[in-house]
Image (cartoon, grey):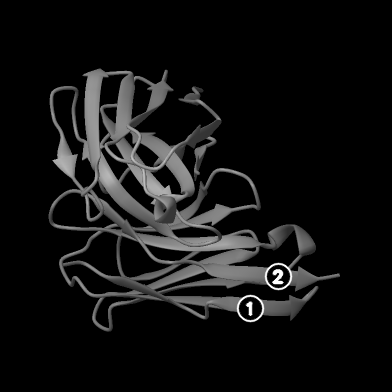
Amino acid sequence: QQNVQQSPESLIVPEGARTSLNCTFSDSASQYFWWYRQHSGKAPKALMSIFSNGEKEEGRFTIHLNKASLHFSLHIRDSQPSDSALYLCAGDTNAYKVIFGKGTHLHVLP
Amino acid sequence: GGIITQTPKFLIGQEGQKLTLKCQQNFNHDTMYWYRQDSGKGLRLIYYSITENDLQKGDLSEGYDASREKKSSFSLTVTSAQKNEMAVFLCASSPGTGVYEQYFGPGTRLTVL
C-alpha cells in the first residue's frame, strides 16, 4: 500500500528564513507529485506539481523530486507570515488515486 | 472557473445515526473524491469516483457509503456515526486522476454527540 511520510511535523521559522519541507513516498511507480497548502479554516489548494526528476521554481517556492531516493521536497525562500499553513504532499498510486501525507504545520514568525 | 459546494457546512448527529453529506461541482470534472481530515492533520481518502458510473473504495471506507448520483454530484453517507469520527469531511474534484490538480470544497464539519 502506498505510503507518504512527511517531515517535520511542525516547523517554526522567523520571517525571511529559508524553509525546507520533506516528503518520502513508498511506491516507486508513482509518477505525479503535488504540494498542497491549507491555511487555517480553509480548503487545501494546489501549490505546485512536478512529474519528472529535477527541480521546478515558481517565485519563492522550489520543489525537488528524486525518484531514485523516493524523495520530494518543497523549499520556501524569504518565508513570510502569510506562508503559515499546513503543507501537504501528495503522490499518485497505481490504483489511479492520490495519497496525501499527514502534513507539516509551518509557522512563520513576524 | 468553477466551484465546489458542500452541504451542510456543519452537521451534528447522535451516535449510531445515519448521516449524509452532499457535494456538488460545476467544473464538469470527471473525478470526485471524499476525504476525512482529523483536526489539523492530513487527508485520508474515503471514496473516489473516476467517472460518472464508477465508485472506488479508499483506505478509510469502512463505516461509509458513497453515491455518484450524476457527474456533478457525489454524496457520502456515514452509516452509523461514532464519537471518534468527528472531523472535517472534504470533497474534491479533478478533470481526471494523477496528473490533474484536485479542487477542494470548503468542507463539512461533523460533530457526534
- Pointer 1 and pointer 2 on the same chain: yes
In depth, the one of A86 and B109 nearer the eye is B109
Q: CA distance from mark 1 to mark 2?
A: 6 Å
Q: Identity of the amino acid at label 1?
A: Leu
Determine whether A76 is above or below B80 in the image. below
Q: Quadrant of residue A81?
A: bottom right
In depth, the one of A96 and A67 nearer the eye is A96
In the orientation shown, which residue stands out farthest toward the right?
Answer: A110
Look at mark 2 in the image and give the residue it sits on.
Answer: A107
Task: Measuring from the top left, give residue A82's x and y in whole percent.
Answer: 75, 57
Look at mark 1 in the image and give the residue it sits on.
Answer: A11
Q: Which residue corresponds to the image point at 37% horizontal and 48% vertical from the top-left?
A: B82
Residue B95 seen anywhere in this rendered image of the structure: no
Determine whether A98 is above or below A110 in the image. above
Q: Which residue corresponds to the image point at 55% horizontal and 60% vertical from the top-left?
A: B40
- Horizontal side, residue A96 vs residue B32: left or right: left
- Horizontal side, residue A13 vs residue A25: left or right: right
Determine whether B110 is above or below B68 in the image. below
Q: Quadrant of residue A65?
A: bottom left
Task: Measuring from the top left, give residue B5's x and y in whole percent.
Answer: 49, 24
Which chain hosts label 2? A
Residue B72 seen anywhere in this rendered image of the structure: yes
Task: Measuring from the top left, give residue B43's x and y in whole percent.
Answer: 40, 55
Which chain hosts label 1? A
Task: Measuring from the top left, give residue A92's x and y in whole percent.
Answer: 25, 56
Q: Are marks 1 and 2 in contact (CB under 8 Å)?
A: yes
